[in-house]
Structures are given as C-alpha cells and as structure tokens.
Image: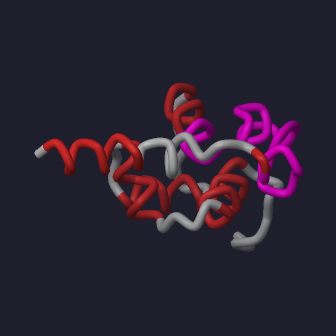
Amino acid sequence: MNTDDTSTTGGRLRAARKACGLTQAALAKRMGITTPMVSFVETGVSKFSASRCSQAAEILSVSLDWLIRGVGRGPDSQDFLDAPRVGIVGSLPRQVEDRQAG
C-alpha cells in the first residue's frame, strides 16, 4: 500500500495521524490499544470497529465520515486547521494542573 494513499480508511488514518504529529505508538496509547493494531489498520491488514473509528476521529480532529468514507473534514481542510485538538492539546491543561496539584 502507498503510505500517502488516502483512498482507504487506513491511509486516511495514517494521514490524519501524521498531520497531528503523532507516532503510531502515541495514537495507540491514547486509544488504549497496541501499536501493531494501529499499524495493521493503516496497512489494511485489519480494521477498527465503529467505536474505535469514532475514537480515532475524535483524537485526530477529523470527521468520522472523512475517516471512514473520505468525505468531510480531513487534514487538508481549513476547518481541520482551525479545529481544537481534543486528543492532543485538550488533555494538556488537565495534566499540567494534576502535576501542579500533586
């Protein structure tokens, strides 16, 4: 599979992950799954369940529709660039507050 191909769900997952600056390991950790599972989905060996697709879309700030079908907000759209990074930046203040309180 061409790693830059966004014609598949796995290719779109990889593109969105890279656009967010996440490694496969970092995405896997945020999703509570193994790094090989992310790799398997990106290469088309395996597929995410609907709930995992939804989780990945939220973490990567893309629309679920784009992740599954390639329609909607993806990493090349302007609203992606303007969208808050729920899975990346959104968790930082809480982590900082937890460290300061501890």
Q: Who's the residue at 60% across and 46% down the image?
A: 85
Q: Residue 94: x, y in percent?
A: 35, 40
Left of 61 or right of it: where is 35? left
Residue 101: name its quadrant: top left
Residue situated furthest top in the rendering: 51
Instruction: Inspect the magenta stretch and tell me whether residue 14 lies in it.
Output: no
- The residue positioned farthest toward the front in the image shown: 100
The magenta segment is 56-81
Q: Is residue 44 above or below residue 79?
A: below
Image height of 29 relative to 20, above or below: above
Residue 71 falls within the magenta-colored stretch: yes
Which sits in the foreground, 10 or 93?
93
Q: Quadrant of the N terminus?
A: bottom right
Q: Residue at x 62, y 60 (%)?
A: 20
Q: Is residue 5 left or right of residue 97?
A: right
In the rendered image, residue 55, in percent from the top left (x then y), is placed at 52, 34
What residue do we see at 72% from left, 43% from top? Answer: 83
Counting from the top left corner in percent of width and height, residue 98 is at 22, 43
Q: Nearer the viewer, residue 95 or 42?
A: 95
Point out the image quarter for the C terminus. Answer: top left
44 vs 69, left or right, is: left
- Residue at the image position 40 percent from the left and 43 percent from the top: 31
What coloring was used for the rendering?
A: secondary structure
Q: Residue furthest left?
A: 102
